[in-house]
Image (cartoon, grey):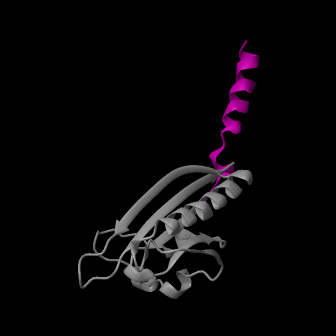
């Protein structure tokens, strides 16, 4: 019996090897600036990054070496950018724009799903117009995918 259980246990642990998984994040930024002035996009990185290159360690809680990291080195040049419509038009909230964005986002999710990506989590937030003199605002959504 032990001869059978050990190989089965080893096979089960290798079947769930987390190192074989890939992850992807897509960020959706939808403008809520009145009159359709803002820019709305779906952004998907096509460049691999090494987070360790941007990471430092504090040992005393105060001294940081973050100043040694050049922000320009952190920016990528290659990514997918899908144009979306703004939530607001001259007449206020534009429901046709929202439905159009939903169709574009759904198409992207369906294509990723066909490629084997699984939508794991969705996180969203909003920075809304703070009144008459603000005129700013975005609705941001991050889609987290896993493959493997």
- The foreground one among 3 and 77 is 77
Identify the residue shown where x is 60% and y is 80%: 76
The percent position of residue 118, horizontal first and vertical second, equals 63, 49
Residue 1 lies left or right of residue 29; in this view the side is right
Identify the residue shown where x is 66% and y is 59%: 107
Residue 115 lies left or right of residue 64; in this view the side is right
Vertical position of residue 73 compared to residue 141: above or below:
below
Rendered-image quadrant of the N terminus: top right
Q: Indicate whether residue 129 is drawn in magenta.
A: no
The percent position of residue 133, horizontal first and vertical second, equals 24, 85
Vertical position of residue 68 compared to residue 114: above or below:
below
The percent position of residue 146, horizontal first and vertical second, equals 62, 52
- The foreground one among 78 and 27 is 27
Give the total number of marks visible in the rendering: 0
Decide if residue 11 is in sight here. Answer: yes
Q: Quadrant of residue 49?
A: bottom right
Decide if residue 70 is in sight here. Answer: no
Identify the residue shown where x is 29% and y is 69%: 60
Q: Which residues are magenta?
A: 1-23
């Amino acid at each position: 019996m032990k001869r059978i259980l050990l190989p089965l246990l080893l096979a089960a642990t290798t079947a769930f090897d987390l190192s074989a998984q890939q992850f992807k994040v897509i960020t959706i930024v939808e403008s809520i600036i009145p009159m359709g002035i803002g820019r709305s996009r779906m952004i998907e990185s096509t460049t691999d990054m090494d987070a360790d290159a941007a990471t430092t360690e504090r040992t005393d809680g105060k001294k940081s070496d973050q100043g040694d990291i050049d922000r320009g080195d952190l920016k990528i040049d290659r990514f997918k950018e899908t144009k979306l419509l703004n939530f607001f038009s001259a007449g206020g909230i534009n429901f046709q724009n929202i439905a159009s964005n939903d169709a574009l986002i759904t198409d992207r999710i369906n294509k990723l799903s066909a490629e084997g990506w699984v939508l794991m989590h969705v996180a969203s937030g909003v920075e809304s117009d703070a009144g008459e003199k603000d005129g700013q605002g975005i609705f941001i959504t991050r889609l987290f995918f896993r493959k493997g």
